[in-house]
Image (tube, rainbow, N blue to C red):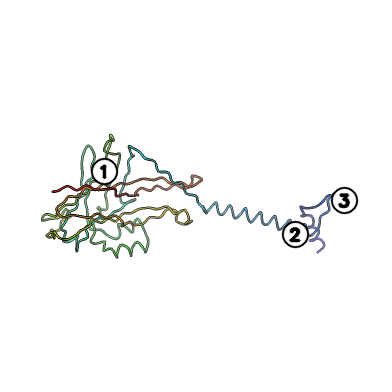
Amino acid sequence: MAQITQIIRKMDIFGQPINLNLDLNTKYKSSFGGLISIFIILLLIIYSVNEIIGYTIQRGIQITQETKFSYDPDLLELNQTNFIFAIRVNQQDFYNSPSFDITINQRSQKNNSRLQLQQCTLEQFTSLINSDKILKFLQSNQMEMWLCPTSQFYIQLEGTQYSLSFKNLMIDVGKCEELSSWGKICKELEENESYQLQFITKNTFINPFNNEFVAEDYLDNSMSLQLNPGDLQRIDYHFDKHITKDFQGQLKIEQCCQIILEDYLMKRI
């Protein structure tokens, strides 16, 4: 016991000089001072370990976002690995008996090509966003009544109307005549009915307060447009790309598909 007390006394970092030698020591050290010193050392060790662990798991990430306007946006490529969308008119049994026809065209200065549409499947969404909430959302929205691009779709968006290279999407909605673009027999349009063009898209939001999921994907169904029978709808559908980094530049997240529905034009057929 005396030996342990002696060791503790030697750890006293608050020893005071006594201006003379006491047991061949120039400083007087006590057991109480040694205990206080051990306690302070342990606190410093615990604090240091805690800081290292917090840094390792990126706790308390400080997210900064910077949005820059560009007159000539760079190329944005969308496919089944990073994006999915669904579109429909809110009429009964739209997919099987449509009153409206929907076509989507990929346009550029050199050529145009049609984006093939098909009946949506749950797998197209769950392969990108694996969540029980997403599955319930899709089932409650009757996804079999929606149109989605085929599994091998490829979209390129670039520039503006005044750029040397301009690539965009054009969504046309018009009266269905005999057979829809996806091969279903058209239904007679009821002129007095009110219709909406509805969208579901994959989007991303940044949550700096969630340590486990800083960037989280979700399905956005907040966008819709009123349809007037007999009109062709041409829609301005903007995709914004964002690069987000944390305060040390270690976390890099590319938001490929933050979408803004800005306005639309109506032209009488």
In the image, which is nearer the foreground, mark 1 or mark 2? Answer: 1
In the image, which is nearer the foreground, mark 3 or mark 1? Answer: 1
In the image, which disc is placed on residue 70? Answer: none
Q: Earlier in the sequence, mark 1 or mark 2?
A: 2
**Label pair 2/3, CB-CB below 8 angstroms:** no
Q: Earlier in the sequence, mark 2 or mark 3?
A: 3
In the image, which is nearer the foreground, mark 2 or mark 3? Answer: 2
Compared across the picture, whether 113 is left or right of 216 comes to left
Compared across the picture, whether 155 is left or right of 129 comes to left
Instruction: Measure how far apart labels 2 and 3 are at the Cα level.
Output: 22 Å
Q: Which residue corresponds to mark 3?
A: 24
Instruction: Measure how far apart labels 3 and 1 are at the Cα level.
Output: 88 Å
**Frontmost residue, 204 versus 267:** 267
Compared across the picture, whether 54 is left or right of 166 comes to right
In the picture shown, does residue 149 fall above or below 140?
above
Q: Which residue lies most toward the top here?
A: 164
Q: Which residue lies most toward the left here?
A: 178
Which amino acid type is marked by label 3? Answer: Leu
Q: Which residue corresponds to mark 1?
A: 168
Q: Which residue corresponds to mark 2?
A: 35
Q: Around disc 2, counting alpha carbons within 10 Å, would you say few (fewer than 14), some (14 to 19), or many (20 or more)?
A: some
In the picture shown, does residue 165 fall above or below 139?
above
Can you give x and y, in whole percent of width and height, for residue 195 in the image? 20, 58
